[in-house]
């Protein structure tokens, strides 16, 4: 039965019935077209990725009415996790958006749009920063929506993009969304380097009001993105981020775990790359802390817990959560995210039971044997909000207190100058609170992230011949000792390998 | 201890009334040498040290910026502070009418910080300069 045999009255009834049917089943729907790697997308809104679904005029109108007069899209931000972008925090600036709807043979063009975030960035060839809407997101996370059949559910869609439409779309015969990302001047560093488009393609979905609210509330990737302004540039939650050690850089903490015995000095028993950001309000006070880190190597048979302790002032109240993920797996490891809250010093247990958490498929140790391939380790991230903002000067200095608890010996191991903190460790029981060995070397070092892990049982001084001169000179010469390893005596653990 | 590196002072003169103050608060490089003898090998096992040696590869720097002299059309003032290699240390909005102080962590061989002040108004030229460490 074709439409030409139906009377207008029957058509209207059918349309109403179809509309009613669609209303009951309105689901967020991924589109077949994408925004390509060149930063441009011309997307047919009537072409869903799942061909068993239907998007037509009545469906579009339902979406529009659901948002009070706008079409709202979700975008899966899918950028290269390199430079200052990473898997947990990625961003794109938008140059333009056009929605073209054809109704009764007439094209209606809508070019106003908005997202939840803006920034100031310079386009390529320019140094003038102008406001642009942005899309922020992450990868590796699975969204969980109320509607199981929603295309947002179990996906990695991130940010929303809204286009106001002031006419009914029921009779639309075609609709296209044209999106062009901004080609930013990456030579300026951040924020331009962060908000470039570098990978793609980016998937797009038409979303219901419920799913849009979910994604907006989630605000994926926004915790550490640089220069995130509110959506209107009219004031509000603008703030700044202090990056420790720097945006795109990490501290590397390397340990000898035979404390208090003198060690073999390969400093690979556990190696962790981590960084912290302090979130400031408009007064320059700290309102939140966030961080991220990776297990880089585990060259030990001992089992450890890795903590990061930040000695906040007495009485400071913090609340937040810790996420823990494995590369290639969607969502968190079982038991995470884990809520944390406390008063005063924050002691975050970020990698628990490392021997069980991270194993090589063949060997007992990970990323330390000469003939062993290098694999990426688990990643933690955390965000802690302070109940009351603190002046920046009241916070302790970086790299804070990254320490180890060794289950097999019962000892905790800190950087020199720190004291034991765990009530259940043997340190205090045995009267051991000095973290230097008999030759006055430490059991823990913090180095820049270009440092690579020494091969098993390789003395750090053999792997890095300039280290001893650096130390012997009182840190006045060979300041880049960590960039000059003996290539055969270190693993290729550069950040490009272990961060994801 | 408050230092006014010569280069920063020159900037201050040129960009009056921008004011930068820099305080190294992490000890920095150049500790007293822990041993007068030449190393026997490069191995740690062959080179016992005197007590109290520092192994820090980073040093804290306290930076104070007063943007009140940055005359702009825009209403909001933003600061980007970077290491000499371009890595961002701070990025965000600052109060334009009062000094802004923050502590950053630099590597021992970093010799300068770069700063940039800008507003939301494209008509305001960014104010750029560097602070010698």
Image: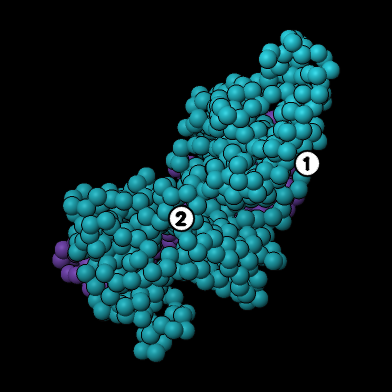
The residue mark sitting in front, 2 or 1, is 2
Assign a secondary structure to mark 1. loop
Image quadrant in which the N terminus of chain A is located? top right
Mark toward the start of the polypeptide (2 vs 1): 1
Q: Position of residue A186 (x, y in %)?
A: 51, 32
Mark 2 surroundings within 10 Å by alpha-carbon count, few (fewer than 14), some (14 through 19), many (20 or more): many
Identify the mark at residue A283; answer none if there is no mark.
Answer: none
Q: Chain of mark 1?
A: A
- Image-quadrant location for residue B35: bottom left
Q: Do marks 2 and 1 both belong to one polypeptide chain?
A: yes
Q: Position of residue A299 (x, y in %)?
A: 27, 63
Quick one: which residue is furthest to the left in this view? Answer: B40
Between residues A226 and A326, which one lies in front from this camera angle? A326
Q: In the figure, is residue B56 to the left or right of A308?
A: left
Q: On the image, numbered disc 1 is attached to which residue?
A: A234
Q: On the image, numbered disc 2 is attached to which residue?
A: A325
From this viewpoint, is residue B72 visible?
no
From this viewpoint, is residue A3 visible?
yes
Tell which chain the image draws in cyan.
A
Q: Residue at x 71, y 53 (%)?
A: A282
Assign a secondary structure to mark 2. strand
- For the residues labelled 2 and 1, the Cα–Cα distance comes to 37 Å
Q: Position of residue B108 (x, y in %)?
A: 41, 56
Q: Residue at x 57, y 73 (%)?
A: A345
Task: Tell whether label 1 touches label 2 (CB within 8 Å).
Answer: no
Question: Does A430 sit above or below residue B95?
Answer: below
* Colour mode of the rendering: by chain
Q: Chain of mark 2?
A: A
Q: Residue at x 35, y 60 (%)?
A: A358
Tell which chain the image draws in purple.
B
């Amino acid at each position: 039965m074709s439409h030409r045999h139906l009377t207008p009255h029957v058509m209207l009834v059918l349309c109403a019935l179809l509309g009613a049917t669609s209303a009951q089943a309105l689901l967020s729907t991924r589109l077949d077209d994408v925004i390509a790697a060149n930063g441009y997308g011309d997307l047919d809104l009537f072409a869903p990725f799942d061909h068993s679904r239907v998007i037509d005029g009545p469906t579009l109108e339902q979406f529009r009415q659901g948002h009070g007069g706008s079409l709202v899209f979700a975008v899966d931000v899918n950028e290269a996790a390199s430079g200052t972008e990473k898997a947990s925090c990625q961003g794109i600036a938008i140059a333009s958006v056009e929605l073209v709807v054809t109704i009764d043979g007439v094209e209606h063009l809508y070019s106003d749009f908005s997202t939840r975030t803006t920034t100031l960035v310079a386009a390529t060839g320019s140094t003038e920063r102008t406001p642009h809407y942005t899309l922020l997101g992450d990868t590796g996370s699975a969204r969980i929506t109320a509607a199981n059949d929603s295309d947002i559910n179990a996906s990695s869609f991130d940010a929303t993009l809204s286009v106001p439409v002031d006419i009914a779309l029921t009779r639309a015969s075609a609709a296209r969304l044209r999106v062009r990302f901004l080609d930013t001047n990456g030579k300026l560093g951040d924020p331009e380097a962060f908000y470039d488009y570098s990978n793609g393609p980016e998937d797009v979905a038409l979303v219901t009001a419920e799913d849009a609210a979910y994604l907006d509330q989630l605000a994926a990737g926004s915790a550490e993105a640089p220069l995130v302004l509110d959506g209107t540039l009219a004031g509000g939650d603008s703030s700044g981020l202090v990056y420790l050690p720097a945006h795109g850089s990490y501290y590397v903490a390397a340990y000898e775990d035979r404390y208090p015995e003198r060690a073999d000095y390969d400093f690979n028993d556990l190696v962790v790359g981590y960084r912290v950001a302090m979130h400031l309000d408009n007064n320059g006070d700290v309102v939140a802390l966030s961080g991220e880190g990776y297990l880089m190597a585990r060259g030990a048979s001992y089992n450890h817990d890795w903590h990061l302790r930040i000695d906040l002032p007495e009485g400071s109240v913090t609340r937040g959560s810790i996420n823990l993920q494995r590369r290639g797996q969607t969502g968190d490891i079982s038991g995470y995210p884990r809520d944390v809250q406390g008063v005063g010093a924050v002691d975050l247990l970020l990698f628990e039971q490392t021997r069980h958490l991270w194993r090589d498929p063949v060997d007992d140790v990970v990323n330390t044997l000469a003939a062993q391939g290098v694999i990426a380790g688990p990643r933690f991230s955390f965000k802690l909000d302070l109940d009351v903002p603190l002046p920046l000067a009241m916070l302790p200095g970086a790299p804070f207190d990254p320490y180890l608890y060794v289950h097999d010996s019962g000892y905790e191991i800190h950087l020199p100058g720190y004291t034991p903190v765990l009530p259940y460790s043997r340190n205090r029981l045995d009267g051991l609170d000095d973290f230097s060995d008999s030759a006055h070397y430490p059991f823990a070092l913090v180095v820049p992230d270009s440092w690579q892990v020494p091969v098993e049982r390789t003395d750090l001084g053999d792997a890095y011949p300039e280290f001893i001169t650096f130390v012997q000179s009182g840190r006045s010469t060979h300041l880049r000792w960590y960039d000059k390893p003996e290539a055969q005596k270190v693993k290729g653990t550069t950040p490009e390998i272990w961060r994801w | 201890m408050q230092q006014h590196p010569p280069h920063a002072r020159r900037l201050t003169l040129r960009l009056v009334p921008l004011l930068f103050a820099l305080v190294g608060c992490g000890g920095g490089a150049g500790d007293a040498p822990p041993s007068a003898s030449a190393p026997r090998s490069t191995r740690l096992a062959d080179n016992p040290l005197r007590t109290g040696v520092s192994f820090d590869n980073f040093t804290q720097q306290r930076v104070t910026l007063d943007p009140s002299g940055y005359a702009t059309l825009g209403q909001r003032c933003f600061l980007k502070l970077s290491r000499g290699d371009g890595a961002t240390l701070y990025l965000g909005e600052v109060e334009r009418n009062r000094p802004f102080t923050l502590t950053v962590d630099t590597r021992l061989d970093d010799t300068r910080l770069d700063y940039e002040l800008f507003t939301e108004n494209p008509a305001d030229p960014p104010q750029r300069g560097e602070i010698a460490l």
